[in-house]
Image: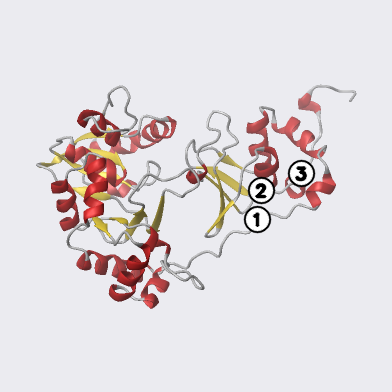
Amino acid sequence: MANSNPKDWKVDFSKVRKAFPLDWVFERMLGAIPKPMSGTIRYSICPNPECGASSEGSVKVSVKDDTWKCFACNKHGDVIEAASLYLGKSPVETALELSGADTDAIRSYTPPKPKPAIERDDSALEEVFSKLVAALPEPSRDGIEYLAGRGISPEITRTACRKGILLTLPSNPKEAKEFLLHHIGQDLMTRAGLWKEGSKAPAAAFRPLVLVSNNRRAAEFRYLRATRSDEVKSLRYGTIAPWGWLGESKQRILITEGCIDLLSAVALGTKRSIMGLPGCENWRPEWFETFRGADVLAAFDDDDAGRTALEKIRPVLEAAVGGPIGTYTLPPGAKDLNEELKLKLGLKM
């Protein structure tokens, strides 16, 4: 090439974007395995080298409508931005390198298809969660034992169950399916999106730990055990909504990542009221409208995602409070509040 200055190279970016499927970059360049989900394809590898690969169950990157987003590092973009990040080259250099790829192989590539997007019926979901709370006034023995293994006492587990934010289905999937059919019914679960058409059982029957938001409009279903690398950690249904625990004062507030960390904070002895976010990136500014003048302490996970999310939410919280907020410092060896609790109790990490 006569002119070696990349700034002077002429590239038709629209042509490159049209020729190269975004999923091809993730699968052929990054070696990621596609995970079809409702309305999207997920991957466990981020093109950002600083974020990189996670366990297969994390599926932290979403690809939809020719764009991608990583929920861990918050990077996002199109096919050129993904390849550019991964290769460590400029968009122009990346586009030229993509243009030199085997076009026959690309033409023969068939992108994965996402599962049909679920048309959520929020009123049906709220009815499902309300019926579950009414039908499960006490936690199961398996649920108590599992949470005790994570440092959360039976007393706290029972209190959370009475509050309706922590429920436990039967541990046996067949029994859980029968329980759900008896108390909820297949028709309502189908309308709520919990039972997919053509499925023999709802996925929730295999994840007996249910964490229900305080407004009964959202819930997470989890295993009563540690997840394997090839498993999705939790199934979330409903809108974005937080968990809450009323402490001795509404003016001293602790904000955590998730419900398990909320319960861990209670077990660690905090007297603050607690708001558990459904993921460090999942929150709404209106949730903090009553925080004016409050003493707010944020206890996010000590990892890249947690630190990035904290800096993103900090100005929103400080605007709501009308001043600075505090940041909770985890002890050495703990990446979140539950790990701190297990360290304190001498439990196996």
Q: Is residue 293 something one can see in this rendering?
A: no
Q: Which mark is residue 112?
A: 1
Residue position marked by numbered label 3 in the rendering: 16
* Foreground of the two, 227 or 192: 227
- Specify few, some or many for label 1: CA neighbours under 10 Å numbering under 14, 14-19, or 20 or more: few
Instruction: Identify the image quadrant of residue 102.
Output: top right
Q: For marks 2 and 3, give the CA distance.
A: 14 Å
Q: What's the amino acid at mark 3?
A: Val
Percent x, y of residue 312: 40, 35
In the figure, is residue 187 to the left or right of 319? right
The three-letter code of the residue at mark 1 reads: Pro
Comes first in the chain, label 2 or label 3: 3
Kind of element beneath mark 2: helix
Marks 2 and 3 close (CB-CB < 8 Å): no
Q: Residue beneath label 2, please?
A: 23
Q: Residue furthest left?
A: 248
Name which residue lies at 38% across and 71% down: 189
Q: Residue at x 42, y 32 (%)?
A: 308
46 or 145, which is in the foreground? 145
